Structures are given as structure tokens and as C-alpha cells.
Image: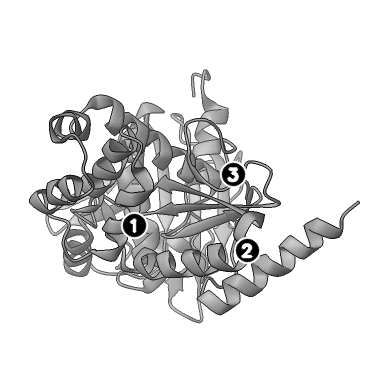
Amino acid sequence: MSLKPPVGPQDHVQGYPDAPIELVEYGDFECPFCGQAYYSVKAVQAALGDDLRFVFRNFPLAQAHPHALPAAQAAEAAGLQGRFWEMHDVLFEHQDMLDEPDLFRFAGALGLDLERFARDFASPEVAAKIRADFLSGARSGVNGTPTFFVNGERYDGSWAPQDFVAALSSLARDVAVRP
Amino acid sequence: MALEAGKQAPDFSLNSTPDQKVSLSELRGRRVILAFYPADWSPVCSDQLPIYSELVPEFRRYGAEIMGISVDGVWCHAAFAKDRKLRFPLLADFEPKGEVARAYDVCRRKDGFSERALFVIDREGIIRWSYVSPIGINPGADGILEALENMEGKKS
């Protein structure tokens, strides 16, 4: 099961383009498992350092999680002001506070231009970006949230912090010794 | 083994609500996705069906309607669909239990419920793609989307 399309300019990326490990998450800001996985990803980032680049794509199960779509809109709107990752972190750290006034409060706390944020939050472009992420996940074999892809292939192993760090560190070593 | 591509999809008439029935023959002219699943409320099904629910507009873009089928009764389906806010019908293969699953050859006789199986049926009622997932594994939607994409541009 492989990632379609590959990581490109449309994506939110942390880390260097030539990092040997590329981790892509399809996530939903209201999903409790994604909330747990947020800390696993932080652990992997801390352990692998420059060997990892991390990409987040939206997979909001909007019917099941009524806050998931507005939260994704907030993250994308923050992204248009260069602050996607700050908003991503705030959302996952406050999954019990995702009502619309909370989202605008977070935007204010991040120092965003709130008029522009409000416009982007409700814009068709942001909605289309989220939908495109969702459909790319459906095409790539996402079957729940979170679903991870490592170097383009679906990762079906455990993402509990220790397991995830061990699996990706071992893969990083394998990639490093390849001639 | 589940019925394979090229076979005629067996017709059925099943309740989608206490007073509404859906039959496959009425849907001739539309493409149909049948998602057989073991049971309402089971953890894997509870992940699988909400993804399909989000994709209803995408399936329609390909001229396809999706329907879930399990051996649960209509009241159980109604409660499950409401809880998960599903936007497509769940059909009750309830009496005789599992009869439609048997017709599609996806019944687990010893368990009394169906396999986790997907069928994509064309406008003429011919199965174009089928897939049986390991019971504990959510097959996602990529196979369905690929099957629909392969049918694009064809009249059926």
C-alpha cells in the first residue's frame, strides 16, 4: 500500500528533504488515537533528529468527529501564515477544546492576523486542500486514524512511542548502510 | 471464495429501515458498492464504515451508491448508523440470516456472520471487482476507488 501522491510542495513538512526516513501521518485533530500518536511522533523526532522528515496530511472523519474539520481548517489557515506546525501542536495538545471560539483564541495566541485567519478558515481553497488530503489518503489505503506511511509504504506496526522509535531507528540504520 | 469479477451479482431485497426495502434490481443503471461486514459496533467495522461515509460524494462522482450489509437487524442498524452518523444505507441480512452473504459466497457459517468483503457492481448488475479482507483488517477504500476508476469511461 503506497503513498499517492508522493510528498510534494503541497505538503506541510518538518525536517530536511534528504532525510533518510520520511514519515507521513494521515490524522484527525479530534481523534483520540491521533492525540496519543502526536506524542509518539514527537518521540521519534527527538530520537531520529535530522534523519527524519515528518509530513502531516488531513484525514478528518468529519461525520464521526464534529470538530475535526474546523480544526483542520484552523491548521491550514495558520499554515497560510507560515504557522501550520504551531497550530498542529496546539490542537493536539488541546483536543478537548476545539470549538470555533477556541480555534480563534489559539490563532490569536499564535499572533496570527485574525482577519486573514478568519477569511482563510472559511475559504474554498482551504476546504479543497483538506478534501484533497482526505482523498489522497483514501487512495493510498488509509484505513483508520492515524495511518502512517514510512518512505512511501504504509506502516502497519505499532506506533507506541518505544516501538515506533525502535522501528524507525532500525530502518534509519539500514538506509544509512545501503551503498 | 467470494463471487468473482464477471459474475452476475445475485439479486436481493433487504430492509434498510423497518419499513423500507432495497433491492439490487431496482438499482440497475447505477453502479453499486456492497460492503459486507461482520457486525455493527465491532471495533474494525466502526473504523471502516465512517471512512466510506466521508467518501459518499466521491463514490457518486463515479455514479456509484454504497451500501453496507450485515446480519444485524434493522433496529440495531438504525442505532449504529445514527451513532456513527453514516450517510449510506445499512441493509439487514437478517431473515433468513445471512442468506445474501451465502449467495455472494461470503458467509462464515460457523460464526453466523459474513466475511469482511467488498463488491463493486456495474450498471448492468455484473460484479466488476470483489475482495475479501482478513476479518480483523479494515480494507479501507483504495480498492473500491481503483475499481471505480478502471470502470470510468465505460458505459456499464
Residue on which disc 3 sits: A3
Which residue lies most toward the bottom here?
B110
Q: Marks 1 and 3, Cα distance to the nearest angstrom?
A: 24 Å
Say which of A69 and B136 sits in front: A69
Q: Mark 3 belongs to which amino acid? A: Leu
Task: Give coordinates of residue B57: x percent, y percent.
Answer: 31, 34
A123 or B130: nearer the viewer: A123
Question: In this picture, is B127 found above or below B102?
Answer: above
Indicate left or right for B136 with A29 as reference. Answer: right
Q: Secondary structure at mark 2?
A: helix
- The crowding category of the residue bearing disc 2, from other C-alpha atoms within 10 Å (few below 14, some 14 to 19, many at least 20), is some
Whether labels 2 and 1 share one chain = yes
Q: Which amino acid lies under the numbered mark 2 shown in the image of this protein?
A: Leu
The chain letter under disc 2 is A
Q: Position of residue A139 (x, y in %)?
A: 51, 41
Q: Which residue is mark 1?
A: A89
| Residue shown at 73% from the left, 69% from the top | A170
Which of the marked residues, 2 or 3, is nearer the chain's N terminus? Answer: 3
Label 1, residues with CA under 10 Å away: few <14, some 14-19, many ≥20: some
Number of the label disc, if any, that sits on residue A48:
2
